[in-house]
Image (tube, rainbow, N blue to C red):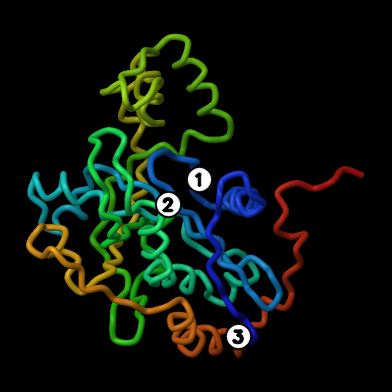
Amino acid sequence: MRIRPTLVEVLADSEEELLFRYAALHWAIPVSSGYGRRLRFLVIDEQNEKLIGLIGLGDPVFNLAVRDDWIGWDKEAHRHHLQNVMDAFVLGAVPPYSMLLCGKLVAALVASREIHHAFQRKYGERRSVIRRQACDGRLALITTLSALGRSSIYNRLRFRDRMLFHSLGFSQGSGEFHFSNGLYGAIFDYAQRYCAATAKKNRWGVGFRNKREVIRKCLIKIGLPTDLLYHGVRREVFAVPLARNTREFLRGEHSRLYRYNASSSELFSWFRERWLLPRAEWDQRYREFTPESYGLWTAEA
């Protein structure tokens, strides 16, 4: 196999951004453009310039019980060190690479040194908008959730003798992705006309804080229970520590991070021998893939 993956950072208003957005439309869970800090990457196969997969990192949710318990956060450490955590809101491969288990490759690449170096470059000397807190640019932990239920991609994903993804438990089954197929657009239009936004501080900007606030206020206004925000799909929560002492650092017990420092090429070499070559040997479906089968629309005759 001649696959040679490379990480390409996605910049605003670029062709890479258009490709990222198009590929993300195929995701099982609708992808939001989001707010706050953002890092996006294309995983490109250098030998043919084709897309292998996507990595999208954004600000984590403020409170996540299984994450906070795993870290062992108290209130002060949580307030100070949430800046050192990001959440992978997009993480996976596209066909035909997904047929070769490259979802595991893309997942492993979030633990590469290229990712935390990119975070350092972008956020190392900035201040947060709300608290005006100086960002130290040290990425210590990445979290993510499975798409639907238990994940076969992230579970038992290792690099040599190190477990990359640690399962922390399951979410409670609430969210917004089931308000789709045009329904959220109608809810948003209604909320803009009849509901008042409740931004906590002027520096946050104007309007509603997030999708959840829009839906909750609309449900209350029309007399429906807010329990409708619970879709019942419990998603598995994972943590990807980027240092040997991630939890100690996030608790404020250590001032220095003792990083794992594997490069993307090292991670791929391990993946190639462990998963790629064995899968390519017995599963030849990737040879039958046609680009037309991945389209979102079909041309009318």
Indicate the quadrant containing the N terminus: top left, top right, bottom left or bottom right: bottom right
* Quarter where residue 194 is shown: top left
Decide which of tag 1 and tag 3 comes sooner along the chain: 1
The residue identified by callout 2 is 89
Q: Is residue 260 left or right of residue 73?
A: right
Q: Nearer the viewer, mark 1 or mark 3?
A: 1
Q: Nearer the viewer, residue 266 or 277?
A: 266
Decide which of tag 2 and tag 3 comes sooner along the chain: 2
- Residue at the spot 74% in from the left edge and 74% down from the top edge: 288
Q: Marks 2 and 3, how far apart in space?
A: 28 Å
Instruction: Say what amino acid the circle numbered 1 marks.
Output: Val
* Quarter where residue 71 is shown: bottom left
Q: Residues within 10 Å of mark 3 (few under 14, many from 20)?
A: some
Residue 138: image x %, image y %? 28, 60
Above or below 170: residue 246: below
Instruction: Say what amino acid the circle numbered 3 marks.
Output: Ala
The residue identified by callout 3 is 280
Secondary structure type for disc 2? strand
* The label number, if any, that marks residue 31 in the structure image: 1
Q: Nearer the viewer, mark 2 or mark 3?
A: 2
Q: Is residue 288 left or right of residue 156?
A: right
Decide which of tag 1 and tag 2 comes sooner along the chain: 1
Q: Marks 1 and 2, how far apart in space?
A: 8 Å
Above or below 187: residue 256: below
Q: Is residue 245 left or right of residue 291?
A: left
Q: Residues within 10 Å of mark 2 (few under 14, many from 20)?
A: many
Q: Marks 2 and 1: in contact by CB < 8 Å?
A: yes
Residue 92: image x %, image y %? 50, 63
